[in-house]
Each structure stands twice: as structure tokens, then as C-alpha cells.
Image: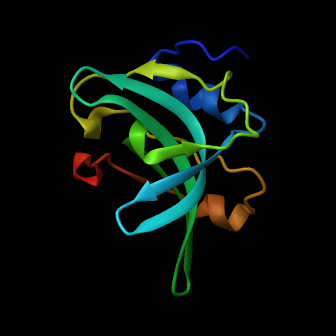
């Protein structure tokens, strides 16, 4: 699959077909974590945003979390190929953007069953 533009209505289906999404390091305020890049989104006001998936553990709760984040928070890995990452055009407010599917290489069913998609928050800049 070439990393071309995908209509938002087909984004989840396209992302679910990616065999091995590339790994990224995500730099959040006070935290650095690892995840995978599922897609890129281009929004007129927010610019480039990244659709990412990460595994979160809080106390006894585990969840596979997907979220749209400002693109500049991602650090690519020098060993990964990002050429096939799909892109989409995002319109409207963040709560209207597509919900990302629970895709994470090697994640057990337990993680995928507890999938939660968080809405983009620009204050994470």
C-alpha cells in the first residue's frame, strides 16, 4: 500500500490493513513514551497531526489508546520506514475527526478489547 491520501470515511479500514505500523517516540509534557504511527491528518487550523496508538497501564487498568496528537511531538525511528503511512484530510472540530481503530503490533486481545480513543487536545503542544 502506498502512503497516499485516504478519505476520512475509509481511514479506519485502511489503518486496520496495515501489517506493521512504524514505531515512534512520543514526547508529551514531562513524559516520553513509545507508540506506533497509524496515519497522518492534515487540518486547516491544526496543521499536521499524527494518529497514534500506544499501550497504557494505570494501576490495574490496561488499555490500547488511540489519539490524534500534534505532529511535532513525534520522533521517528531511524530504522523505520514511514513511506506507507496513510494520510487524510481532517475537517471541522477534533471531536468530528475519525476514531482510530485499535491497531498495535503484538497487542493481546485483552488490550484491544479495552480500546479507548481520546480526542485531540491542542494544549498538548
Q: Nearer the viewer, residue 22 or 120?
A: 22
Q: Is residue 84 left or right of residue 20?
A: left
Is residue 5 placed above or below 120 in the rendered structure? above
- Image x and y of residue 35, in percent: 60, 53
Q: Quadrant of residue 39?
A: top right
Q: Quadrant of residue 45?
A: top left
User: Coloring scheme of the render?
Assistant: rainbow
Is residue 8 placed above or below 52 in the rendered structure? above
- Image x and y of residue 120, in percent: 32, 45
- Image x and y of residue 108, in percent: 75, 63
Q: Is residue 83 left or right of residue 96?
A: right
Is residue 122 placed above or below 6 in the rendered structure? below
So how many labels did they put on this image? 0
Dividing the image into 4 quarters, which one contains the N terminus?
A: top right
Q: Residue at x 68, y 67 (%)?
A: 110
Which residue is farthest front? Answer: 78
Q: Is residue 14 left or right of residue 17?
A: left
Q: Quadrant of residue 70?
A: top left
Q: Residue at x 73, y 37 (%)?
A: 80
Q: Residue at x 73, y 30 (%)?
A: 81
Q: Is residue 39 left or right of residue 124?
A: right
- Image x and y of residue 44, in percent: 24, 20
Is residue 109 placed above or below 35 in the rendered structure? below
Amino acid at each position: 500500500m502506498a502512503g497516499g491520501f485516504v478519505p476520512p470515511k475509509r481511514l479506519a479500514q485502511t489503518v486496520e490493513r496495515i501489517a506493521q505500523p512504524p514505531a515512534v517516540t512520543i514526547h508529551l509534557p514531562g513524559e516520553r513514551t513509545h507508540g506506533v504511527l497509524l496515519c497522518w491528518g492534515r487540518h486547516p487550523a491544526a496543521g499536521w497531526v499524527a494518529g497514534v496508538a500506544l499501550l497504557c497501564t494505570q494501576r490495574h487498568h490496561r488499555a490500547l489508546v488511540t489519539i490524534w496528537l500534534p505532529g511535532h511531538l513525534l520522533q521517528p525511528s531511524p530504522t523505520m520506514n514511514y513511506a506507507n503511512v496513510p494520510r487524510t484530510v481532517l475537517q471541522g472540530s477534533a471531536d468530528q475527526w475519525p476514531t482510530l481503530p485499535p491497531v498495535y503490533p503484538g497487542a493481546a486481545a485483552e488490550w484491544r478489547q479495552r480500546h479507548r480513543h481520546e480526542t485531540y487536545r491542542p494544549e498538548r503542544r
